[in-house]
Image: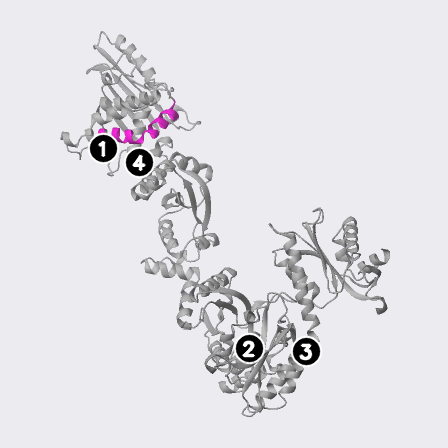
Amino acid sequence: MLRFVDAWFEGITLDAIAARSVDALYAAVCDQFELICEPRRLGEPHIRVHELDGREGHCDTALIAVADDMAFLVDTISMAVRETGADIDWMMHPIMRVARDESGVPCDIRSAAESTNHGDEESLVRLEFAAPTGLESDALVERVAHNLGDLQAVVGDWQAMRRQLQKVVAELDTVPSGVDIDECEQTQAFLRWLADDHFTLLGYRQREVQSGDNDAEVMVDTPGTSLGLLREDRAGLDPDGYVAPAAALDKYTQSARILVVAKANRRSWIHHAETMDVIAIKRMDDTGNVIGAHRFLGLFSGEAYAMSPRQIPLLRQKVRDVVARAALRPRSHSAKSLRYILETFPRDELFQSSEDELYNTVMGVLGMRETERLRLFMRRDRYARFFSCLVYMPRERYTLELREQIEGELARCLDGRAQESDAQFLRGALVRIHYQIAIEGDGEGDFDTRELEAHLMAATRAWPDRFAAAAQHAGSLMPAYARAFDAGYRERFSAEAAVDDARVLAGIDDGDTPVLQVIGVADGDVQLKLYGSGAEMPLSTTMPVLENFGLSVHTQRPYLIQRPGHAPQWIHEYEADHPQADALRDASRGESIAQAFAAVIAGTAENDGLNRLIISAGFTPRQVVLVRTITRYLLQTELPFSPDYIQEQLAGHADLVARFVALFEFRFGPDRAADDGAAPDQDEIAAMLDAVASLDADRVLRAFHGVINATLRTNYFQPDAHGQAKPYVSIKLDPRDMPELPRPLPMFETFVYAPEVEGVHLRGGKVARGGLRWSDRREDFRTEVLGLMKAQMVKNAVIVPVGAKGGFVVKNAPSEESREARQ
């Protein structure tokens, strides 16, 4: 055990040790020792996944394994763990020399650094990670075991695949008739370069030409030639699925190329999680006829991607051909730029593009103007499996969001799905994004690259540019707003919506009352925006007002609009619930909400529950003022209910209250026809009153109806000097028609309502004498005035037959302001 512990910690860094407590390290060593002591046969990996106690950082799961030491072992196991969505936090990988007896039980364990006389090398792997939600441990163990089985096949056949590669090189020593000698030599040089550790061999299969149906030549696999991942005995083998169906491959058997480099259809689950590469070389007889093909499956090494293409056989000839065809003056600016483009061109594109495709693309890049916002270059894969798309744009435009947007547009327009994307920052303030879009079916559809490029330019136009275009289209030039909206707003709203919002903001100066707009109704949610300039309105001010409209706000999003040289402006977006949300699809109700909100904030209207009648009954703000006037009067008649309760009863019977208001407007409206046919049906109102179930509601509604019937005159319809509705409402009443009034009853009564004052005047007869009182009794000043009127009648008995008295209360007066100061 002690020798195992020494070997286990051999080579571990101090940082790795410091990342775990002594107890955790002890538990890890014990777990690994227990696993390595289990009987194990050669080629049989042992894998476990178990939970941790969670005390070590954020890791709660560990995977431990013992297997024959092989190349790419740790990479392969780590990839399987990462495929579950987990991030590996801690890793250990000691290598031991283990001697086992015939039953697989270890009889000697030593460090791999010691003599090779003590058994075969075995790798011990421990990975600790936070398990993603829904991780199935058994499935992970099965996946790791399967991948290690594939790795064992690859490692076991590596020498055979390498010999096969060398055999192909030797075959090309004899140049078949009709085949270009230079191409054969380039192919040989390229294959030797691959064998020089520039290509990780993962599989091999040989194919041969046979006669098929109707004597057509087809390629079929040669039995007994498969190696690595392409082994015939491998479970679930689908060799054609790695590249393309045989029918697609056969279309290129008669091409002039000896060697073809292509991308496979799948990512590797061994060594690196990248799309695998396929090297296909034709087999020809002495007369130059194609008799088959060699197919190697693998991955180009990292060094292959880092080397200059001028150092890679096959590519250097492509580069020379492009440079010669361009015929640029040596050492000129254009020649140097072309060389840079080729040096930094995506390596996979250099391998897979034909000479014509490569020339057309790099010359297009060379000809780009600095002012171009976006350029697109497309290449269809030779097997019609995917499109390779190169997008160039200025570095200042590049964002991850824009990259993903272009990816989505390409996938949608090409009717495919995005497989890979990679961005590279280039010299000259350019960014190149390489997309691979997989396509279904035969992939033979026609796509106009320039048309698709124009579509991408329109779809990805920078937000300020889209705003300017939308403003111009709308006939409004507002350049100051193009870059004024913050990132949160630009992410959520279109440029067209911003133009509408900018128009509203342009009409608001610093200190003006904020403007509310109902934007619409979506999925049962009422959407509103509040616009303002200067200091933002706090939620504590806004929420009570919106709630009294019956709106229950559940989402609020603030946005800042900052124009250079101007005071900051802002927009608050609200989403709210309302049981009658669909009623706000009527634009007039939204306008009424906006008007009422502005009046409340400005102090020219009161904020109470009667405002909910705007949505439920479709009232205008002025009609709500009428209802509020009558309600305030009823509170002075000793009706035994609180203001909130009366408001609740009226709002709960909005249809009936709407008929009351219609009756009032019919009786006193100057524009109403006075014929009986247009009058509201009093019998219908009576029937609706009889149908009210609640006694309290019945009493409130009948009292309200009684005030309307008792009204003799009103100034409700009179405009002020500016043609606007007067800020106060007065109604003259006949008290004899109101059964709720306490005795004695005056002959006439006038009630005046305004947001800042309420008053009443009681007159005992047509000719009466009395004064006016400033009352402090806001809740029952009419009772006070009624008592004073009775006293006045006694006092004036010898002067005039009856008395009169008026009184008022001032509401919302500043507490520090005295009566004397106000007078």
From this viewpoint, is residue 176 visible? yes
Single out the residue that lies furthest toward the left: 675
User: Looking at the image, do the residues carrying marks 2 and 3 touch, with CB atoms under 8 Å apart?
Assistant: no
- Choose mark 4 or mark 3, whichever is in front: 3
Pointer 3 residue: 162
From this viewpoint, is residue 728 visible? no
Magenta region, residue range: 642-663
At mark 1, the secondary structure is: loop
Q: CA distance from mark 1 to mark 3?
A: 100 Å
On screen, residue 562 above or below 460: above
Magenta stretch mostly in which secondary structure?
A: helix
Q: Is residue 93 left or right of residue 312?
A: right
- Choose mark 2 or mark 1, whichever is in front: 2
Q: Is residue 214 left or right of residue 318?
A: left
Residue 462 at x, y percent in the picture: 44, 62
Q: CA distance from mark 4 to mark 3?
A: 87 Å
Pointer 1 residue: 717
Q: Earlier in the sequence, mark 2 or mark 3?
A: 3
Q: Which mark is residue 220?
A: 2
Q: Earlier in the sequence, mark 4 or mark 1?
A: 4
- Choose mark 2 or mark 3, whichever is in front: 2
Q: Earlier in the sequence, mark 1 or mark 3?
A: 3
Residue 799 at x, y percent in the picture: 22, 9
Pointer 4 residue: 621
Pick the quarter of the image with the N terminus: bottom right
Q: CA distance from mark 2 to mark 3?
A: 22 Å
Residue 686 at x, y percent in the picture: 24, 24
Query: Which amino acid lies under the numbered mark 2 shown in the image of this protein?
Result: Val
At mark 3, the secondary structure is: helix
Query: Which amino acid lies under the numbered mark 3 shown in the image of this protein?
Result: Arg
- Choose mark 4 or mark 1, whichever is in front: 4
